[in-house]
Amino acid sequence: FLHQWEVTEVDPGRKIVYSWRYGGLEGDSTVSWELTGEGENSRLTFSHTAIKPFDTDDPLFSKESCQAGWEFFLNGQLPAFFQND
């Protein structure tokens, strides 16, 4: 799918928000990433909110499919990116 993003809000080093669409398909959503400090650690708050629902008849756009995709990225790919060797 052609991902079309438009950054709508930036707080450098702290927060980014963008709209997320798929070119040629119905649906629109907003994705937000926000970092906050907690002592020596950081907390990532992530949200993906549907503004106009995607085609829920397509299994690729089901809630379960989207949740599995984000969980794969957030719990698998993102931590590996930040691992120290």
Image (cartoon, rainbow, N blue to C red):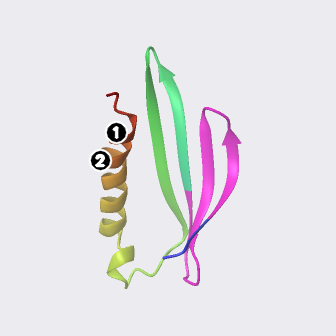
Between 1 and 29, the one nearer to me in the picture: 1
Disc 2 vs disc 1: Cβ atoms closer than 8 Å? Answer: yes
Between 50 and 43, the one nearer to me in the picture: 43
State the SS at label 2.
helix
Q: Is residue 11 magenta?
A: yes
Q: Which residue is mark 1?
A: 79
Quadrant location of residue 62?
bottom left
Quadrant location of residue 29?
bottom right
What span is in magenta? 5-30
Q: Give the answer, above or below, for where 27 lies relative to 51.
A: below
Q: Which amino acid, by three-letter code, is at mark 2?
A: Gly
Instruction: Give the residue displayed 45% in from the left and 14% down from the top.
Output: 39
Specify few, some or many for label 2: CA neighbours under 10 Å numbering under 14, 14-19, or 20 or more: few
Instruction: Give the residue displayed 58% in from the left and 78% down from the top.
Output: 23
Instruction: Give the residue displayed 39% in from the left and 40% down from the top.
Output: 81
Instruction: Give the residue displayed 39% in from the left and 75% down from the top.
Output: 61
Name the spot of residue 7 as percent of width and height, x first.
67, 54
Q: Give the answer, above or below, for where 82 lies relative to 21.
A: above
State the SS at label 1.
helix
Q: Which amino acid, by three-letter code, is at mark 1?
A: Pro
Q: Is residue 44 magenta?
A: no
Q: Is residue 62 left or right of residue 33?
A: left
Q: Is the stretch drawn in magenta largely helix, strand or loop?
A: strand
Q: Which residue is mark 2?
A: 76
CA gap between label 2 and label 1 equals: 6 Å
Q: Is residue 65 left or right of residue 48?
A: left
Q: Give the answer, above or below, for where 83 lies relative to 9.
A: above
Name the spot of residue 14 as percent of width and height, x first.
60, 33
Name the spot of residue 27 as percent of width and height, x first.
55, 76
